């Protein structure tokens, strides 16, 4: 049996804009709520910068969760 999820490409070419599009799985972004960026092998700073440009609210939520986590630990 073929596992189609592992055979799917994570990068596509958008013909209308002429740019490559990289698919980021939601589960990898959600991991940011629980782990630091350097512990998530599927993400890096460059990817996170692109996500923050398109979805600034998401980065605000991640920062808020980290702030609350830090406040509780103090």
Image (spheres, rainbow, N blue to C red):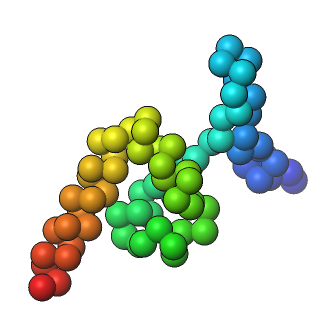
| 9 versus 13 height, above or below | below
Total labels drawn = 0
State the image quarter where residue 22 is shown. top right
Residue at x 41% of width, y 44% of height: 52
Residue at x 43% of width, y 39% of height: 53
- Residue 32 appears left or right of 4: left
Give the percent coordinates (x, y) of residue 49.
48, 49
Image quarter in which the C terminus is found: bottom left
Give the percent coordinates (x, y) of residue 36.
42, 72
- Residue 59 appears left or right of 27: left
The residue closer to the viewer here, 7 or 50, is 50
The residue closer to the viewer here, 4 or 64, is 64
| 32 versus 25 height, above or below | below
| 28 versus 21 height, above or below | below
Give the percent coordinates (x, y) of residue 30.
42, 57
In this view, the residue farthest toward the top is 16
Residue at x 77% of width, y 43% of height: 9
Residue at x 56% of width, y 61% of height: 44
In this view, the residue farthest toward the right is 1
Give the percent coordinates (x, y) of residue 57.
29, 42
- Residue 26 appears left or right of 57: right
State the image quarter where residue 11 is shown. top right
């Amino acid at each position: 049996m073929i596992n189609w999820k592992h055979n799917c490409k994570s990068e596509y070419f958008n013909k209308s804009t002429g740019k490559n599009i990289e698919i980021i799985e939601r589960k990898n972004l959600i991991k940011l709520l629980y782990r630091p960026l350097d512990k998530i092998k599927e993400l890096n700073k460059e990817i996170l910068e692109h996500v923050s440009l398109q979805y600034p609210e998401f980065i605000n939520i991640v920062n808020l969760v980290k702030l609350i986590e830090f406040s509780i630990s103090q």
